[in-house]
Structures are given as C-alpha cells and as structure tokens.
C-alpha cells in the first residue's frame, strides 16, 4: 500500500531538512572524510567528540576539570561548545542544563533505597525525626517537629500546630511562602523554606518564562509569632539540600537564561538553515551573565543588586562534556540568613549525596547517553568542611548509570557506588556492579569492583551499612546480594537470595535484620501488589527471607520517597503511606510491627478519608511520633492517633490553623 502523496512529500522534506541540519553541524567536514565514514562499518553507539584546543585553558590530567585563566577564555569555551548544540529551535533537549529525563527503564528514577551508615538521632527524646540518608546530616522535608510544635507545609503556607497536649493539638498560626514545591530545614528557632519560582515577562505579545529560580525564605519563630527575616533568591532549579552545624548546603542546576532564539517560519530547508545561522550568531554574542547564575537577597521590603553566585574566574568544567548548565553548591548560614560560601562547575547535576565532610554530585554526560541509558556517570566531589570555602576536590567516572543518591555512600574515605550498565553486543543486556573509588589528587580513582550482579536486570534498591552493601536487582525474580566491603580494593559478593518479587526500599530493623518494602510479582514478572518482607542477613553467605506479608493491590509511597517511611525503634513499629485500589480501596498509611514470633504483623491503618472528611485528596503523605501519639498529615489536615493501636484521638483541618 502506497503512502498518500502528501505524506511522501512530508517524509522527503523531513529527510532533506535532516541532511541540511547535519551539514550545518559540521560545515568544515572534508568530503573525503564523509566518504570514508560512509564506507566504514556501522558507527559505534556513542560518538565522542574531539574538542578543539581552548586558548587560555590550563591542561589538566585526564579526568580532572578544565580550568581557565580568565573569564574571556571561559566564555570562549562555552560559545564554542554551544554552537555545536544549537539548532533551528534552540538547544537540543538535554544540552542546556535541565538533565536528560528518565535515563533507564520506567520507574528507575524513583527513590529506591536509604543508605544510612549510622543511627539517626531524634530531635529530642520520644520524638521521631526525618528519615535521612546519613546520621547527623538533616534533609529537607514537608514536616518537622521538636516535640512541642509541629511544622508542616501545605499549599503555599507554613503551618504551626501546638502538640504539647497529646490529646488536643491546637493551631498556632501560619505564614505564606512564595513559590511552589516547598521543603524546609529547621535550625534552632528558624525555618529555612526552599521553594521554586518562575520569572514571567512580556515581549511582543508573548509571555516568556525565564528558567526557574530557587528561593530560601528564612522564617524566625519568636514565641507565638512567625516573621520573615530574609529571602535569598538564586537562579537555577533546586536539586537537593543538606544541613549540619547550622549550615544549609543547596545544590542548584541552572540553564542558559535570556538567550532568545529565532525559530523558522516554515518547514523548508532554507528556513531551517537561516534559523540555525541566526541562533549561532546569537550564541556568539552571548555574555557570561547568560550562562552563570546570580542571586539577590530580599530584606525588609528591599532587594540587593544581583551578583554572581561564584565569580567567573572560579568556574571550571569537566573535560568530558555534560551539558551547558552550571551546578552550584551554595552554603547558607541560618543565623545570618546569608550566603557564606559557594562553588560552581560548568556541568549538570542529577543526583546528590552528602557525608559529614564531603558532598558528591553525580551527572550523566549528554554525549554518553545511548538508548535512553547513560554509559557513564561523572561524579564530582566537593569538600564542605569549611562552609566559607567550599572547594572542588576531585572528579571521576563510573561505567553505567546510577538510580539516585542512595546508590552512593562514603565510608572511611572511600566512595561506594552501585551502578547498572549496558554490556556490549548485538543484544542490549544489562549488568550491575558496586564500584569503590578514592580521591587521588584531583581525581576519583577506581580501586575495586564487585561485578556481575543481576545479569539482564537492573538495580531496584541499595543499602550500605558500614562495611556491607545490600543490592536488589530485578527482572522476574528478586536477587538480594550481600557484598563485603571490608577491603575496598577487593569487594566480594558473599551471598545471594533469589525470591519472587522485589524490594524497592530496605531498612535495618535490628541486628542482622532488614525490612524490605516492594512488590509481589507473578512468575512472569507481573506486579500483583505491595508487600513487606523481613530478611535475615546475619549470615552474609546465606541470606534468608523470614517472613512476607501482602499489603494489597497497590503500592507504598516509599518506593519513590524515602521521607515517607518512619521506623520507631522503641516499639519496633514501621509506618508507611499506602494506596490500595483492589476490591477494598484504601488511601492512607499502615502500621507494621516487626520482629518476634510473627515476624511482621499489622498494628492498624490510618486514613483521613472517612466520615465528613471523605475526599480524594485525603492520602497520607507523612507520619511523625511525639511521645505516645502518631501525627499523620494529608492535604486535608493533621490527625492525632494512639501509638499502640493507631486509633484516632483528634483531627485538625489546615483551614482551621490559619
């Protein structure tokens, strides 16, 4: 069957445009080279570009950052790289600093593990804290409590609830916060609320949006009142934040701002060529202010003049290209409500991990993405011990891609990274590994690897605990690997357990015990519903599953949000939000008692969807414990429940707390 003439014409036009765009991308390519390429074997999966020498650039050893001796040299380098990426409609997707989207199979971007290496101290005795990655390193969340006041973010407001009376929570005021996507950190009597904003402007009958801006609103809680002390507004998208010692460290990813490209008026080849040439000329006229972020501070109704987060002479980039965006690590002193230190590199940021002394930023270079997967992951190490002098310490790379921040963990100066990669061959096959790296000068050097995990599978969960690593891979069955990291130079797989289903979250619940939250699956790998599993890893050579409980045909939020999980050690209670959509729908949270003869038993369930409060928006997002009360939060409000059986004590709507 022949295609209609119009479709055939469109296909020919598109092919012609593609050829023109290809020709424009390499205008100086000799004809002989083109013939040689056409007659050779098929091109490899990834084309690694040979970059021209850069005037003014200092030549570092392979793997280190490219450094520049002047701002002019830095701008010249950016322009040259940007000209290769600009097309008729602007920059190619994934080259301007917004990352690459999902770099693996569906669901791989979800939070799948928590890499605790030490117990997390509670804010005070009898009060639960945020489920964080490293003990002593706090992470932003939507709910925080000190045992007397509960702070919660809902909509565009920060609410306070007095929880000093266990039977009668009372509203204690609220304050409006600009932006959206709010998270907060608490330092003494101040709340640092992180939010995202867009800057809108009008031009020629169009409303344009500049790249995102990240705001940190500093709220002081003085007795019964809350007041805004300052708001720090920075160019860039928020990636992650950590806090310790009263210093909040934010990682921002900023894209090119203010470069307005001309688009072709029609789909003809000449129109495409003219648009490409105009856009290249626009890049050639760009300034450093287009590429690197600035910030300003708002206090008492006035704003400071914009100034760069990091001076251009201190900005570097990786030798292997990873986009045109800029990653900045910014230190904010909560007591002074101002930026006290920062560092930037000309690269994108995808995942962030922080230890007590260092912060690691992982990114997938744009030139290393193939079939939706990254063939390499770059890792940049920043020394954060001195907040006023954040320094890039080392850079390195690992083969394949990592799922999230929990695939990284530092122990005794060694970084452990769990990664999945494509094996070479006609058929795309995957294999996973745990790689160990140590800083050697300004390079992160690989010193060991435990390879061959989960062939033709990918990683679903990782947990590093001291000198042990626990890795879950999955395709049809769930292998749980126990890895010995005592000698980082020779990691070794000690044991393996294969069972149906998989765990997407692992949490230590006692000596040699792990609680896994994930999915039960059929023999063909079809998901059947949420499940909880208790693993005995006391004998690393023979891990075993002691107990398994079906939770219903749905999923638990901890699969993508580790802050939704709460483990209360005094009573061996696990609380997790749960959504069930089988014969008996449920939207709330479940409490599980772990340990003892039964292994796992259900204590009860919490729900805000009942009675006059019935609403589709009633799904529980967080739970906290204050002494003998469980407080659960949803878009409807906060509910107080008994710790022993989860029976309801009181309910307070958000609209009643303003």
Image (tube, rainbow, N blue to C red):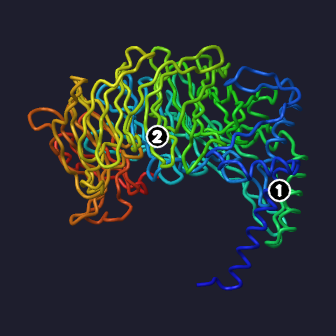
Q: Are marks 2 and 1 in contact (CB under 8 Å)?
A: no
Residue 576 place in picture, x, y as percent? 30, 45
Residue at the image point whose x is 31% and y is 65% from the top: 614
Q: Is residue 320 above or below residue 259?
A: above
Q: Which residue is mark 2?
A: 141
Residue 264 place in picture, x, y as percent? 82, 67
Q: Nearer the viewer, residue 649 or 309?
A: 309
Residue 135 place in picture, x, y as percent? 41, 24
Residue at the image point whose x is 34% and y is 52% from the top: 620
Q: In the drawing, what numbered circle is on residue 308? A: none
Residue 119 seen by the camera: no
Residue at the image point whose x is 81% and y is 64% from the top: 263
Q: In the drawing, what numbered circle is on residue 23? A: 1
Q: Nearer the viewer, residue 67 or 305?
A: 67
Q: Nearer the viewer, mark 2 or mark 1?
A: 1
For the view shown, which residue lies furthest in the front direction? 39
Along the horizontal axis of the image, is 103 left or right of 557? right
Q: Nearer the viewer, residue 80 or 302?
A: 80
**Mark 2 or mark 1, which has the lower sequence index?**
1
Residue 599 place in picture, x, y as percent? 14, 37
Cα distance in 3D space between marks 2 and 1? 49 Å
Residue 393 seen by the camera: yes
In the figure, residue 270 lies in which quadrant?
bottom right
| Mark 2 element type | loop
Q: Is residue 83 above or below residue 553?
A: above
Along the horizontal axis of the image, is 422 left or right of 118? right
Q: Residues within 10 Å of mark 2 (few under 14, many from 20)?
A: many
């Amino acid at each position: 069957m022949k295609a209609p003439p119009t479709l055939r014409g469109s296909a020919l036009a598109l092919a012609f445009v593609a050829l023109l765009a290809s020709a424009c991308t390499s205008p100086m390519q000799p004809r002989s080279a083109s013939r040689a390429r056409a007659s050779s074997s098929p091109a490899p999966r990834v084309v690694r570009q040979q970059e021209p020498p850069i005037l003014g650039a200092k030549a570092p050893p392979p793997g280190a950052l490219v450094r520049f001796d002047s701002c002019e040299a830095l701008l010249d380098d950016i322009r040259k790289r940007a000209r290769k990426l600009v097309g008729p409609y602007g920059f190619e997707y994934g080259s301007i600093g917004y990352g690459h989207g999902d770099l693996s199979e569906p669901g791989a971007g979800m939070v799948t593990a928590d890499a605790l290496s030490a117990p997390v101290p509670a804010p005070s005795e009898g009060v639960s804290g945020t489920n964080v990655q490293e003990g002593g390193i706090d992470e932003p969340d939507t709910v925080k409590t000190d045992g007397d006041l509960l702070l919660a973010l809902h909509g565009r407001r920060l609410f306070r609830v007095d929880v000093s009376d266990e039977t009668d929570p009372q509203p204690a005021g609220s304050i409006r916060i600009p932006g959206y996507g709010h998270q907060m950190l608490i330092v003494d009597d101040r709340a640092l609320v992180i939010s995202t904003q867009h800057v809108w402007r009008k031009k020629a009958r169009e409303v344009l949006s500049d790249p995102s801006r990240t705001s940190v609103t500093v709220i002081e809680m003085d007795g019964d009142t809350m007041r805004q002390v300052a708001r720090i507004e920075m160019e860039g998208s928020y990636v992650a934040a950590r806090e310790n010692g009263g210093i909040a460290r934010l990682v921002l990813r900023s894209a090119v701002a203010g470069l307005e490209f001309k688009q072709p008026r029609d789909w003809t080849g000449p129109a495409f060529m003219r648009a490409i040439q105009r856009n290249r000329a626009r890049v050639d006229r760009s300034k450093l202010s287009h590429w690197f972020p600035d910030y300003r501070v708002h206090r008492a109704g006035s704003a400071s003049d914009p100034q760069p987060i990091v001076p251009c002479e201190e900005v570097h980039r990786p030798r292997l290209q990873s986009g045109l965006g800029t990653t900045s690590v910014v230190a904010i002193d909560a007591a002074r409500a101002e930026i006290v230190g920062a560092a930037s590199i000309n690269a994108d940021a995808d995942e962030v991990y922080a230890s007590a002394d260092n912060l690691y930023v992982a990114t997938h270079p744009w030139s290393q993405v193939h079939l939706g997967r990254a063939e390499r992951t770059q890792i940049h190490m920043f020394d954060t011990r001195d907040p006023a002098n954040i320094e890039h310490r080392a850079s390195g790379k690992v083969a394949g891609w990592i799922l999230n921040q929990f695939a990284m963990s530092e122990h005794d100066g060694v970084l452990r990274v769990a990664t999945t990669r494509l094996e070479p061959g006609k058929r795309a096959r995957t294999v996973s590994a745990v790689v160990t790296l140590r800083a050697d000068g300004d390079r992160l050097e690989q010193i060991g690897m435990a390879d061959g995990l989960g062939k033709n599978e990918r990683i679903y969960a990782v947990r590093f605990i001291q000198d042990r690593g626990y890795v879950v891979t999955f395709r049809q069955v769930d292998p749980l690997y126990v890895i010995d990291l005592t000698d980082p130079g020779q990691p070794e797989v000690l044991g393996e357990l294969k069972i149906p289903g998989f765990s997407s979250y692992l949490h230590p619940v006692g000596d040699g015990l792990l609680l896994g939250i994930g999915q039960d699956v059929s023999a063909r790998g079809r998901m059947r519903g949420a499940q909880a599993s208790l693993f005995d890893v006391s004998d690393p050579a023979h891990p075993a599953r002691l107990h398994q409980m079906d939770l219903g045909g749905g999923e638990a939020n901890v699969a993508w949000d580790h802050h939704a999980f709460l483990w209360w050690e005094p009573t061996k209670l696990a609380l997790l939000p749960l959504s069930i959509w089988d014969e008996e729908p449920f939207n709330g949270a479940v409490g599980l008692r772990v340990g003892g003869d039964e292994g796992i038993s259900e204590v009860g369930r919490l729900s805000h969807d009942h009675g006059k409060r019935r609403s589709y928006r009633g799904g529980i997002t967080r739970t906290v414990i204050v002494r003998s009360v469980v407080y659960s939060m949803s878009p409807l409000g906060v509910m107080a429940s008994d710790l022993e059986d989860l029976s309801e004590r009181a309910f307070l709507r958000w609209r009643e707390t303003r």
